[in-house]
Amino acid sequence: MQQQIRFATFNVCNLAPAGAQLYDNLQPLTAEEYEAKAEWTAWQLDRLDADVVGFQEIFSQAALRDVLSRTRKYRDAYHAGFDPDPLATRLTPNVALVSRLPLAGPPIVYTEFPHGVGADSGNPDSDRFARAPLHAQVVLPNETTVDVVVVHLKSRRPDYRGGECGADCGGDALNHALNYAMANLRSLVWRGTEAVALRVLLSKLMRENRRPCIVMGDFNDTADAVTTTIVMGAGAPLPAKACGGAPDGEGGGLERRGRMFDCAQIQQRQDQLRHVGYTTVHEGQYSTIDHVLVSEEFHPDSPRAFAEVVDVTYLNDHLGDCKPEVSDHGQVRVRLRLKA
C-alpha cells in the first residue's frame, strides 16, 4: 500500500483557449501564447507530482484536459470540473480537481450560499460564491474516503459599483480615495461572507458524512487573516461539556472536532531558518494566500488521526521570471503519511 500521498493547490492564472475573451482589460491569448502557457503548466504540473491537485482560474475545462494530455504523470488521472456559466452576468473562472487516486462518486459544485448566509451583507451577489467551490470524494490507498473541497475566494481587487472609478479616470482626488476605500471594503465583505458560507458547508459535510476533510485553494488572504480563520473554525465557542478541557469519551480533543488546520502550522518537519513559504509577490511584498487545510484526522495531537502532515513545499521559483505564460502564484504541495 502507498504510505505517502501528496495534495497540492495550483492557481494557473487564467487558463483559457486562444482567442477567448475573458476580462475587458485582458487581451485574449494568441495561439502562440496559449501554446507556451499550456506547455509551462504541464511541465509545472509534472514537477509538482502530487496525487491530488486542486486548480483555480480555469476558464475552460477543455483547456485543462489539453494540459493534462501534455503531461507525463496525469494523462490517465481523474478530472473533475465544470465550465463557467455562459449566461452569467459576469464571466468568472472556475476551479477543478485532478486526481491519480480514484473518486468515490461524482463531483458536486456549490454555487449558492447555504440558507441564511449573506442576507445582511449589502452585496447584490450575496447569495452565491464568486467562484463556486468543488467537492469530490477521494479514496486513499488505505481505502479511507476523504472529502476534498477546492476553493477560490473573492479576490482583493477593488469592487467598484455604481459608476465609481479609480484615480486613472480624472476628477477629485479625495473622492477617488473614498471610492477606492469603499471598493476594497466591498471585496473584503464579499470574501468574508464567502468564508462564512464555506464554514457552514464544511460543518455540514463533516457532521453528516463523518469523513476526513481537506480544503485547498486560493483564499486570497493569509492563514492568520480573519476570513481564513473563519473557514478553519478557529476560536469558535466550545460546547458546554468541553469547557475546562473535559474529555468527550473518545480520547478527548473535542475542541478540534469540526475544525480545519493549516498544514504549514502542523507539519512535522518545521525548519524556521529556511522558511520560504510564499505564493505571491505584489509590489515587493511576499505573502502566502494559497493554503491546504486538513481536519483533525491529520492533526498530530488528535486521537482520531490516521495520517500526519510530513511537510509542506512551496514551488515559487518561477515568480521572479516575469514570463507571460507562467502563473503569478506559487504552488503548495503537502505530503501526508498514512499510519500503519
Image (cartoon, rainbow, N blue to C red):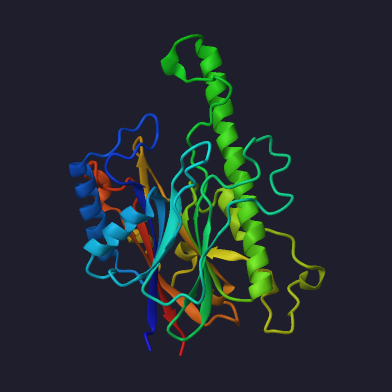
Could you say which quadrant of the image residue 255 lies in? bottom right
**Residue 313 in the image, given as x and y percentages of width and height:** 35, 63
Q: Is residue 7 left or right of residue 131?
A: left
Kindly give the residue lying farthest to the left in the view shown. 32
Is 309 on the left-hand or right-hand side of 174? left
Work out which quarter of the rendered image holds the N terminus and state it.
bottom left
How many marks can you see?
A: 0
Q: Is residue 298 in sight in this rendering?
A: no
Q: Is 97 located above or below residue 227 in the figure?
A: below
Q: Residue at the location (26% across, 70% down)?
A: 73
Q: Nearer the viewer, residue 1 or 67?
A: 67
In front: 206, or 30? Answer: 30
Q: Residue furthest top?
A: 171
Residue that protrudes farthest toward the front in the picture: 87
Which residue sits furthest right?
Answer: 240
Of 251 and 78, the residue lying toward us: 78
Residue drawn at x 57%, y 47% is: 129
Vertical position of residue 97 compared to residue 121: above or below: below
Kindly tell me whether residue 280 is visible in this rendering.
yes
Q: Residue 87 placed where, x, y %? A: 51, 41
Residue beneath the point at 44% across and 83% down = 338
Image-quadrant location for residue 18: top left
Tell me which corner region of the image, top left, top right, bottom left or bottom right, holds residue 181. top right
Percent across and percent down for residue 94 are 45, 51
The residue depicted at 51 percent of the width and 17 percent of the height is 176
